[in-house]
Amino acid sequence: MKPVKVGLFGLGTVGTGVVRIVEGHHEDLMSQVGSPITIHKILVKDRAKARSVSIDPSKLTEDPWEIVQDPEIDVIVEVMGGVEATKELILAALERGKHIVTANKDLMALHGPELLAKAQQKGCDIFYEASVAGGIPIIRTLIEGFSSDRITKIMGIVNGTTNYILTKMSQEGADYADVLKEAQELGYAEADPTSDVEGLDAARKMTILATLGFRATIDLADVDVKGISSVTQEDIRYAKRLGYEVKLLGIAERQDEYVSVSVQPTFVKTSHPIASVNGVFNAVYVHGEAVGETMFYGPGAGELPTATSIVADLVAVVKNAKLGVNGRQASISYKEKKLKSDKQIASKYFMLLHVEDRAGVLMQIAQVFADYDVSIESVMQPPTPDRKGAELIIITHEASKDSMNRVLQAFQDLSTVRTIKSLYRVEG
Ligand code: NAP
Ligand code: HSE
């Protein structure tokens, strides 16, 4: 049995997990694919660095071309990150007929269509199960498991760092800045947490999920993104009081042929299953016309969870090779992309306003909502003895984003509205 030789780009958190699983599950993997899978060469930045797995030092290289140009290597597993330089290496590897397995959501969100086209042209596979929600097999589920259905909605908690921060804020009453600092100390949040907390990491993952779910190429620029840095303890307290949790949700929706994708902190009814996804865990809720509601839950990151997805992709490559069908996946994005306008995007909203406390103000506020055809579901004005003015908490019925933008504009121009403190989408 000729071994399948793997070139590994990166021996950090995920790369180490890949080595552990390929070596630790060697017999099982061989039984499934009929050949031994071996790690042939490993690209690292610094060969002298101490490693937490035992590696034959002669396998380590600092030169990617040693792997790309090695005719013995069948598959490259890319777990080093980076976008432009990594893309060039992957294109060069595909050109030489090597299959690719990657965990790189940044690369796939930005250049997925180009890489997939190149792979198909060269008869190679490119699989990226680990790029979204680490250990949850959501990508293959969307491509294969839902192939017979028409997906109407995907909602994801796809960033563990922000879910950890929001969970701590909710469960312990801690402030955003304090929890972020703690998450950095624990190694959950990066030294520069911008990509996570401002929603960009989630947006990249939602670009991938929406493309697969709606069978049309969704670009990162199509995603409306807002992160969690403006979420306050006051917002979370009101959410809980009204029966909601605040979650950073990626939401991809389709109505007829029109789609929208967004990432934003959202009030989620506590009865919705996604509201109880806590800590660094991820979850993806998928609604299909035929199947109805489904949800997939698990670890979104980490050495072994992420590596299980990578090695499952490796198994798929080798099985395809045995069948002689590498690079023959049917086109995923066969539909034309049609984006919803703001008039077509609808949801319920939570709004917190600070207003003047005198006769007629509530009527003015209600009139603005009426002017833009936004119906109010509930209004609450809790007593605020220590504040000169009133606090109004409003939950709307479903309204278009366009109408809500007009309401916001009108409130900005209304002298009795002192501050628009918060506005959140409401789900569930
Ligand atoms: P990491 O711990 O920082 O490891 C990166 C590895 O790549 C290191 O071994 C590093 O070498 C090597 N490397 C980086 N740049 C290189 C370069 N220019 N030339 C040669 N070697 C280079 O990263 P990670 O957490 O494993 O993540 C890897 C990828 O998986 C990223 O795309 C990430 O987004 C994705 N991912 C990660 C997770 C997770 O749980 N960590 C989950 C899902 C997806 P040295 O060891 O010598 O420094
Ligand atoms: N920074 C990411 C997260 C890692 O917090 O979920 C996994 O992609």
Image: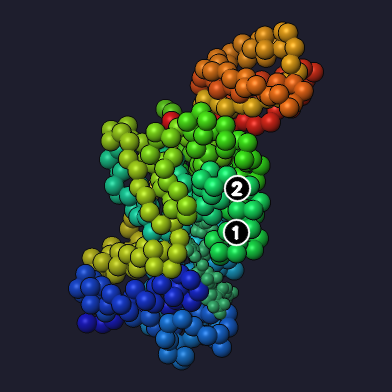
Question: Which residue is labeled 1 in the image?
Answer: 182
Where does residue 296 sit, x and y in percent of width and height? Answer: 35, 47
Nearer the observer, 270 or 367 = 270
Where does residue 145 sit, x and y in percent of width and height? Answer: 29, 47
- The 10 Å Cα crowd at callout 1, few under 14, some 14 to 19, many 20 or more, is few
Identify the amino acid type marked 1: Glu
Asked if the residue at label 1 sits under 8 Å from ligand 2, the reply is no
The residue sitting at 47% across, 52% down in the picture is: 279
- Counting every numbered tag in the picture gives 2
The residue sitting at 61% across, 50% down in the picture is: 197
- The 10 Å Cα crowd at callout 2, few under 14, some 14 to 19, many 20 or more, is some
Nearer the observer, 50 or 27 = 50
Question: Which residue is labeled 2 in the image?
Answer: 174
SS of the residue at dot 1? helix
Quick check: can you spot residue 18? yes
The reply to whether discs 1 and 2 touch (Cβ–Cβ < 8 Å) is: yes
The residue sitting at 41% across, 72% down in the picture is: 17
Name the quadrant of the N terminus. bottom left
* Mark-to-mark CA distance, 1 and 2: 11 Å
Nearer the observer, 49 or 5 = 49
Where does residue 51 sit, x and y in percent of width and height? Answer: 49, 83
Asked if the residue at label 2 sits under 8 Å from ligand 2, the reply is no
Where does residue 297 sit, x and y in percent of width and height? Answer: 37, 50
Nearer the observer, 413 or 344 = 413
